[in-house]
Image: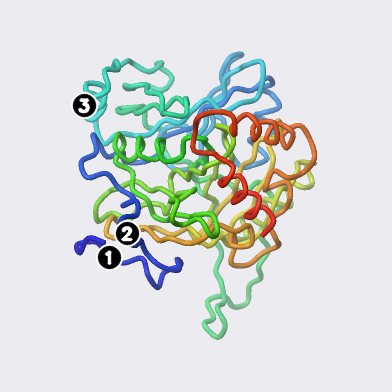
Amino acid sequence: MTSHHGTHNDLHSEQGAVSGEHPGRAKNPVIKVADLAWLEFSKPDLAASERFAHAFGFSTVSRTPDELQLRGSDAGAPCVIVRSGARSRYLGAAFRAADAADVVRLADTTGAKVEKLPESIGGLTVDLTDPSGVRVRVVADTHELAALPAQSTRAFNFGNDVRRTNDTQRPPREPARIQRLGHVVLQTTKYIETLDWYLEHLGLIVSDFKYYPGQRERGPTMSFIRCDQGTTPTDHHTLAMMLGPRHRYVHSAYQVTDLDALAAGGEYLREQGFHHSWGIGRHIEGSQIFDYWRDADGLLVEHFADGDRFDSTLEPGWSPMTASGLAQWGPPATKDFLGLTPGPEALRELRSMARALRDDNEFDLTRLRGLLKVASS
């Protein structure tokens, strides 16, 4: 490891990199994005999407027959844009550049064009495509939405540290108010190629690498990736990426204020008849308290609270990937969360395994054995 970066040991990974392993950052990236701005989806029923969004804790910025913009309570751009389409699918992510000059620099380097965004969003974008074929927007100078009133936090008694007397805890059973977009998780058959593309073009850096048990010498198969803002701490991961038999959206995550908001909001979602996937628990990589739900079209979304923040001094951690290693505490990862529940989605994944093994990509027979071992761990 280079000497000017801190070690990841004693945090939550078994060890750091060994000589010759992926460094987890590019030496000279084109730009360094500041954050994830928003995610874009296509949905066949915007009214149903909005009903779930409100139950999940979003507020509507605007809705037309063709587009729904959703936001959290923090100031900034909308964090989800849903466009009318024939089927439910993930369209891509927008990352926020430090300034318009970075958008121009990225466009000049890639040969892409700088274009104006619609007036409802404002600002500029350069639209790129990552090696997996996913659209990636890098934007600047978008309209700034004013902050909304935040969900109130509660006073806690921690053991004998008493901060609440003559009062009770009664968190209301209401939607957990989303504060902001946290991260998106993607699967690709071109994991290393796609990872390197994000590090080199957007200046992202890896917080943690995961590898299939017994296959570390073949390199990582998953990475948790954060924005590099120097000494300013950023989310443990803004993007997570994993090797798999097809390119697909896995889930996206949205911050709420605390455990009570998350848990009471989950009870509200349950009462509204929405499908709970997995939780409540606390992750290892990122440390977030989590709870996973399926939206109206079956896409996986996460409430989270109390996530880690790292600055740029930490090198990546390395640890084996196991299903049991997804959480420090909480119920075991469900078949629904792991994509193993019998149904159309699991069938698509099985069919894609056969296709991936025939194609020229990183998902070969050895990797398939590793993935199956993870799923059964």
Where does residue 125 sit, x and y in percent of width and height? 34, 22
Q: Identity of the amino acid at label 3?
A: Arg
- Cα–Cα span, label 1 and label 2: 6 Å
Q: In which quadrant is the N terminus drawn?
A: bottom left
Where does residue 363 sit, x and y in percent of width and height? 54, 39
What residue sits right under mark 1 in the picture?
6
* Circle 2: element type: loop
> At 22% across and 45% down in the image, what residue appears?
27
- Of the numbered discs in the image, which one, if any, rests on residue 50? none
Q: Identity of the amino acid at label 1?
A: Gly
- Of the numbered discs in the image, which one, if any, rests on residue 105? 3
Q: Give the mark, 3 or 1, whose residue is nearer the N terminus.
A: 1
Q: CB atoms at circles 1 and 2 under 8 Å apart?
A: yes
Q: Residues within 10 Å of mark 2 (few under 14, many from 20)?
A: many
Q: In which quadrant is the C terminus drawn?
A: bottom right
> At 20% across and 28% down in the image, what residue appears?
101
Of tags 3 and 1, which is closer to the observer? 1
What residue sits right under mark 2 in the picture?
315
